[in-house]
Amino acid sequence: MVKKDLTTEEKILAAAREVFHKRGFEGARMQEIADQAGINKSLLHYYFRNKENLFTAVFSEAVSTMIGTISSIFLGPGQLEEKLEHFYDFHISFLQQNSYLPWFIINGLYERPEQIRKMMSGSDFHPERILGQVVENLKKEGFEVEDPLQMFANILSLSIFPVVAQPMLSHFFNLSEMEMEQFYEVRKKKLARFVINGITLRKTV
């Protein structure tokens, strides 16, 4: 059996991430991915056989990288605000480096919903456990949450939206690349307290 060259595989995965992000699953072509990776199509098929296998590999790699850290943050010890600080510091940085990922997941859910659900269910991601831990943290700290699911959606969207909307934000407010970086750094530091203050206000109304 011929041993695979990991460097070539990494080039293929990097090329596939870019092409799937631009084209979606249906629009992506194996030839374009091969061209992007700088290899011939036969070698691409040797590594991954078909487009579905390649899609699965790219999606699984991207999601597993993110899932492990997020789960360890929220399921580990500590107060909620501290966990939120760690989460936003990691999540915003990760999305900056992998800005294709939110669109990749969204496109995948529209184009390949069953495949995406299957891959997600096969991962070590248990959002219900994370949500349960967040609620438990809040109860221990004396807070009450009327709708935990809405709160959890807010926690995620506060970090995801600015990265997805970066082209719009930088255009509307004429922000340079450095100014966007500063914007993200400030946001990482402020979001945890913003979430906690929102919960406190709901409790005292």
Image: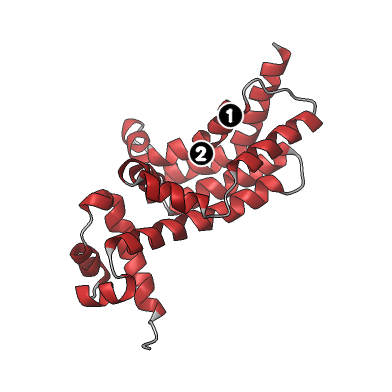
Across and down, in percent, residue 3 comes to 39, 86
Q: Nearer the viewer, mark 1 or mark 2?
A: 1
Image: 69 above or below 137: below
Q: How is the image coloured?
A: secondary structure
CB within 8 Å, label 1 to label 2: no
Compared across the picture, whether 2 is left or right of 94 comes to: left
Q: Is residue 34 left or right of residue 164?
A: left
User: Label 1 sits on what residue type?
Assistant: Leu
Q: Report helix, strand or loop for mark 2.
A: helix
Q: Is residue 101 left or right of residue 145?
A: left
Residue 128: quadrant of the picture = top right
**Image vertical order of residue 104 relative to residue 204, above or below:** below
Q: Is residue 40 visible?
A: no
Tell me the element at label 1.
helix
User: Above or below — where is 76 with respect to 41?
Assistant: above
Residue beneath the point at 57% across and 34% down: 155
Q: Which residue is mark 2?
A: 159
Where does residue 164 sit, x and y in percent of width and height?
Answer: 39, 40
**Marks 1 and 2, the one that precedes in the sequence:** 1
Counting from the top left corner in percent of width and height, residue 143 is at 75, 25
**Number of the label disc, if any, that sits on residue 45:** none
76 up-or-down from 159: above or below: below
Marks 1 and 2, how far apart at CA: 16 Å
Tell me the number on the disc at residue 149: 1
Q: Residue at x 61, y 45 (%)?
A: 87
